[in-house]
Amino acid sequence: MGCRFYVTQAAIFVSGYRWEDGIGPKDQRPTRLDLAWRSVESNEVGTDEFCRWTRQVGSAPMLAVNLGTRGVDAAAALVEYCNHPGGTYYV
């Protein structure tokens, strides 16, 4: 597609998103009601799948954080999950 960055969980969707729901084994991820879209979010495509896909197409991910119903602690935990090599709560 030729894009340098792709954004996931953007705009209205991210305002109710819990990034932790999109990690770990797919069959253990919860489904949640998405109040903004009045649909069910399966969390089948999560952070790891999205980041892997962006690398496959020669791009980079741009992740959004939920500051609508969450806070800076959740945002910091996502940064940790995506960047720390291991040995912490999320990695």
Image (tube, rainbow, N blue to C red):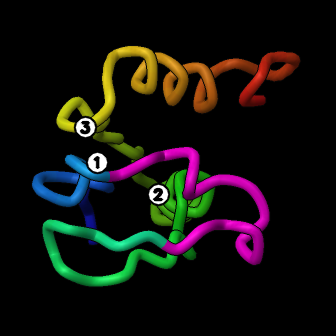
Q: Relative to residue 6, is residue 80 depicted above or below?
A: above
Q: Nearer the viewer, mark 1 or mark 3?
A: 3
Element at label 1: strand
For residue 3, which quarter of the picture?
A: bottom left
At which x and y percent is residue 17? 35, 52
x then y, percent, for residue 9: 30, 55
**Pointer 3: what residue?**
69
Q: CA distance from mark 2 to mark 1?
A: 8 Å
| Farthest-out residue, bottom | 39
Amino acid type for the residue under numbered disc 2: Thr
Which amino acid, mark 1?
Phe
- Rendered position, 28 above or below 66: below
Q: Nearer the viewer, mark 3 or mark 2?
A: 3
For marks 2 and 1 on the same chain, the one whose residue lies earlier in the sequence: 1
Quick check: 74 left or right of 8? right
For the residues labelled 1 and 3, say whether their Cβ atoms are less than 8 Å apart.
Answer: no
SS at mark 3 in the image: loop
Q: Are marks 2 and 1 in contact (CB under 8 Å)?
A: yes
Magenta stretch holds residue 27: yes
Residue bearing mark 2: 54
